[in-house]
Amino acid sequence: MTAIFGAALLYDETVESFEWLFKTFLHAMFGKKPTSIFTDQDAAMAKAISNVMPDVCHGLCTFHLNQNALKHLGYLFHADSNFGKEFNTCIFGYEEIN
């Protein structure tokens, strides 16, 4: 299950600003860290996550994965190709291990 714990508006998108944000988040959550964080490809945010919460799994959200695929591989998504279906199977066709 996906859960959003908070939202913030920042003056800038620097490593320092994101570090402040994540430290403030952890303070508000009494130190409880999320298991995973999914973001876009912002390098400053990725660095701040690894600095403040090095044991948290950081991944890219599926929206941004799809946008990057369309941007760089859009020519493969034409009607007579199975690429789009196979790409989505790679992203969404996972199996849970009990």
Image (cartoon, rainbow, N blue to C red):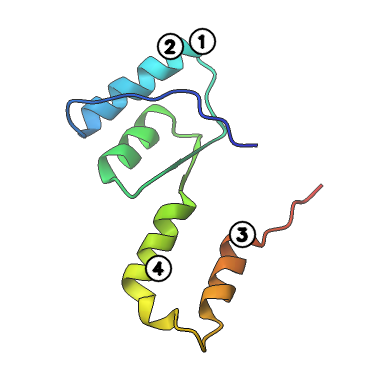
| Residue 56 vertical placement versus 96 (above, below) | above
Which amino acid does the dot numbered 3 rest on? Phe
Q: CA distance from mark 4 to mark 2?
A: 37 Å
Disc 2 to disc 1: CB gap under 8 Å: yes
What's the residue at 56%, 83% (across, down)? 82
Q: Mark 3 = which residue?
A: 92
Q: What amino acid type should be assigned to the residue bearing mark 4?
A: Ala
76 versus 53 height, above or below: below
* Residue toward you, 22 or 66: 66
Residue occupying the point 37% across, 19% down = 23
Q: Is residue 50 above or below residue 41?
A: above
Q: Which residue is mark 2?
A: 27
In the rendered image, residue 55, in percent from the top left (x then y), is placed at: 50, 34
The residue under label 1 is 30
Q: Earlier in the sequence, mark 1 or mark 3?
A: 1
Q: Which residue is nearer to you in this view: 37 or 49?
A: 37
Tell me how far mark 4 sits from mark 1, CA to CA: 38 Å
Q: CA distance from mark 2 to mark 3?
A: 33 Å
Circle 4 sits in a helix, a strand or a loop, which is it? helix
Q: Which mark, by number, is residue 10?
A: none
Element marked by disc 1: loop
Q: Name the residue tied to disc 4.
A: 69
Q: Is residue 57 left or right of residue 7?
A: right
